[in-house]
Amino acid sequence: MLINGEHVSDMDEIEVKNPYNGEVIDTVPISHLNNVDKAIKAANNAKKELQEMSAFKVSNKLYNVCEKLKEHREEFAELLTKEVGKPINESYVELDRSIETLKLAAEEAKRIYGESVPLSAGLNGKGFFAFTQKVPLGVVVAITPFNYPLNLTIHKIAPAIACKNTVIIKPPTDAPLTVMKFAEIVNEEFPDGVINTITGYGSEVGDALVASDKVNKISFTGSVMTGFLISNRAGMKKVTLELGGNDPLIVLDDADVDAAVKGVINGAYLNAGQVCMGVKRIIVQEGIYDEFKDKLVKETSKIKQGNPLDKNTTLGTLISEKAAIHVEEAVNNAVDNGAEILIGGKRDGAFFEATVIDKITHDMDLVVRETFGPIAPLIKVNNVDEAIDVANSTEYGLQAGVFTQNYKNALRCANEIEAGTVFVNKQSTFRTDNMPFGGFKNSGCGKEGIKYAVDEMTKTKLIGLNLR
Ligand code: NAP
């Protein structure tokens, strides 16, 4: 672990395994709570030096971090593929997005400012000159999941530092290594204690960080269940929760079917379906249902499952065999209730085949819950009203996609689907790193996307000068 610029170990360790071949890649400590306290102390002590730094300097340092990550792109991508099991080409994309995210934060560091406020517009407010400032919160704790460990963590660290907060990272236990390696780079640029890492189980060290009254903000990405636990434990501190999704992709009768099929291929099987904004429910109008289904099966048959380090592989493993068994159970349960597998459906260790399932009803567990696997479940509907109803029928509301050439239907879906983002003629599985990202309903609260994350990581102070 990295605490106050020093490497710190503990008595017990966790093995980090490659889900493809079971090889132990490395070990990380299970932190004792006294080291959690040390990290919190270090982060608090480092606040003053960081906050006294000019925005110009903070921005330059973030650019330097970005350049260093670029230099080490290849080795980071390889490590990411080894610890997560995602195809190497997907790891390159995660690296490129991470570099982009850092660049956006370096830019944003130079435009964090308030506004003048006309107090004279309020009763008895005449004679003041007043303005706001955006003030850092202090110590930000970043807790992140296994599926995009590097970029999702950078989505927290980079804006936090851009607005001069110090950071403690609790990386995912299944995939902590790229994040810890990245923290080393940040530490080379910034004073000791600005960035710290604590490893160990979320329910212990994560919980201790969340409950601490010397931490000012929890920025969490992960499951709805953990999100609820965190919001209950966090007390008065600010919390951003980026939680699970169960994103619909609606295909209406007038859609460009080939484009919609491509949307599913890119959205349902990416990272073996372990994507919060992955396409998880495909809602298809009856007029084009058969054509869509046949084309989807054909394109799914071209997916290449294999060694994640092989550049030709398009489907890697899930994060663990346990996760793949969980998907297998959800699929079997749907089949027991009348669903029909058109292609795929088999598990081999931590692999699960790209799978299209027909005859899904909107109330089956497979689509009511978030299934984190390479599954394309098809739900047939009669019309746009039913499509919207089905889309809104879960507790989630992260992103959504609708394929139609009819602008009235497009706008109806955009207005009526309860989700943080609705794309028209694009699947939900799309994000640029500057856009406001964050769900409705149980998919979370608060937004990320650098500028929006900075808003969530600062507080507004008003300064009023009485000139009378
Ligand atoms: P998870 O089990 O909720 O874990 C996420 C992080 O929380 C891990 O670092 C975990 O540590 C930690 N944690 C667990 N219990 C905790 C507690 N009581 N207090 C504090 N921290 C705790 O999620 P996951 O299985 O890794 O990730 C998959 C989920 O993340 C899916 O639901 C997915 O949709 C969601 N996700 C959302 C977004 C988004 O932006 N909306 C993006 C990606 C993923 P351990 O690893 O040690 O358990």
Image (spheres, rainbow, N blue to C red):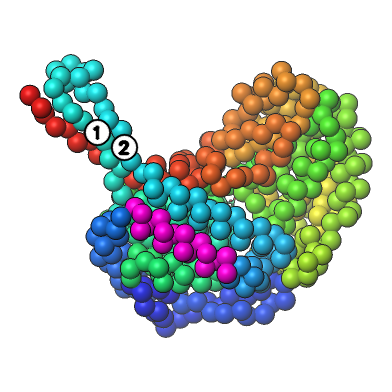
Left or right relative to 249: residue 399: left
**In the rendered image, which residue does mark 2 sit on?**
114
Going by the numbered disc 1, the residue's amino acid type is: Phe
Q: Label 1: state its secondary structure.
A: strand
| Residue visible at 31% across and 64% down in the picture | 43
Q: Position of residue 314 (x, y in %)?
A: 79, 60
Eyeballing the image, is 320 above or below 371?
A: below
Q: CA distance from mark 2 to mark 1?
A: 7 Å
Left or right relative to 403: residue 208: left
**In the rendered image, which residue does mark 1 sit on?**
131
Mark 2 and mark 1 in contact? Answer it, CB < 8 Å: yes
Q: Quadrant of residue 303?
A: bottom right
The one nearer the camera, 359 or 194, is 194
Eyeballing the image, is 118 above or below 263?
A: above
Label 2 Cα neighbours within 10 Å, binned few <14 / some 14-19 / many ≥20: some
Is 69 magenta? The answer is yes
Left or right relative to 52: residue 59: right
Is 415 magenta? The answer is no
Which residues are the magenta region? Answer: 55-71
Q: Is residue 308 visible?
A: yes
| Residue visible at 47% across and 64% down in the picture | 65
Q: Position of residue 283 (x, y in %)?
A: 76, 34
Q: Which quadrant does the C terminus fall into?
A: top left
Q: Position of residue 341 (x, y in %)?
A: 86, 48
Q: Position of residue 413 (x, y in %)?
A: 67, 25
| Residue visible at 61% across and 23% down in the picture | 415
Q: Is mark 2 within 8 Å of ligand 1?
A: no
Eyeballing the image, is 362 above or below 239?
A: above
Q: Label 2: state its secondary structure.
A: loop
| Residue visible at 29% across and 46% down in the picture | 135
Going by the numbered disc 2, the residue's amino acid type is: Gly
